[in-house]
Amino acid sequence: MSTLEIPDDLLREITGKTIVITGGSSGIGKATADLCIKLGALVVIGDITPPPNFEATKRYKFLKVDVSIWESIRGFFAQAKDLFGRIDHVFVNAGVAPTTDFLNHTLDSDGNIAPPNLRTINVNLIGAINTVWLATYYLQNDTRESSPAERSIVLTASASSFQNFRAADYTTAKHGVLGILRGLVGKLEGKVRINAIAPSWTATGLIPPEPFEALGVAVQNPKVVARSVVFLFASGTRHGDLIYSRDGIYLEINRATGGLLENTERLLGGVMNEDEVYRRIS
């Protein structure tokens, strides 16, 4: 599997495009917004709070949103569309750190086992579903005469989306995000492109850097990840890709030769896969 090159010239294809980003006030979302602005795009970011020292401009707007609340994310998209009159690309990025430890249970006031804290699931997975639901609506109902290749959704998955990772609620959510990609790639063919990123350890503020430094583990700058997001926006031929990033190295690991899908087909022994069967009977 060869590394992926991201040329600067291709990134400039987003000049003049309208980009909507959830979780855009920090980390990967903010780095992506900053890069999009630098490349001449129009950007609407949504988050609980604005970025530090944020100042809106003619091309850069902030809207408050909680992606886990339907009314909030629905209103966010309506306002984002009104701001610039169109939406070209959506970055489904909002997320929080793990919140539930399956080994430390608590009791309620009656002495019964309290339910798990589902905040991570609600934001990282339900919020992603809410955002993709609205993104597909707005992008498919764009009345402009433009190619579906010019409209796309990029999801923030994770390196934990395809391996064991002992933060169970976070891993469950990120496996689910990869499931959104794989569940929709066939349905959206020829309509809207959908891709995802799978960053390794990144300085997003969710986890303090000190433990990684003590272990000698590299933590990449979110600017590295932002380039992969904009690459997927700009590359009109990519659909169903999952780009893994680590310390400046990029790999497409879903559809590439030797990637996840090829290895899955090899393990299953060449039988007609479940997606093909479902396509034929539905």
Image (spheres, rainbow, N blue to C red):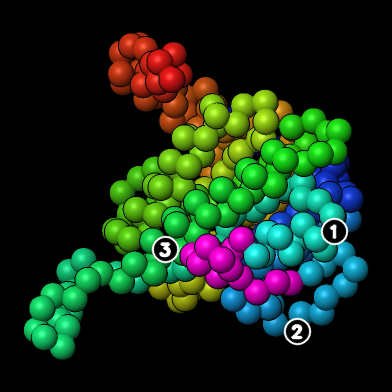
Question: Which residues are drawn in magenta?
Answer: 62-74
The residue that appears at 59% across and 76% down in the rendered structure is 48
Query: Is 34 located above or below residue 233 in the figure?
Result: below
SS state under label 2: loop
The residue that appears at 42% across and 63% down in the rendered structure is 122
Earlier residue among tags 2 and 3: 2
The residue that appears at 66% across and 65% down in the rendered structure is 76
Q: Nearer the viewer, residue 219 or 161?
A: 161
Earlier residue among tags 2 and 1: 2
Please provide percent x and percent y for residue 171: 36, 54
Mark-to-mark CA distance, 1 and 3: 29 Å
Q: Amino acid at mark 1?
A: Phe
Q: Amino acid at mark 2?
A: Asn
Q: Which residue is mark 2?
A: 53
SS state under label 1: helix
Mark-to-mark CA distance, 2 and 1: 23 Å
Q: Amino acid at mark 3?
A: Asn
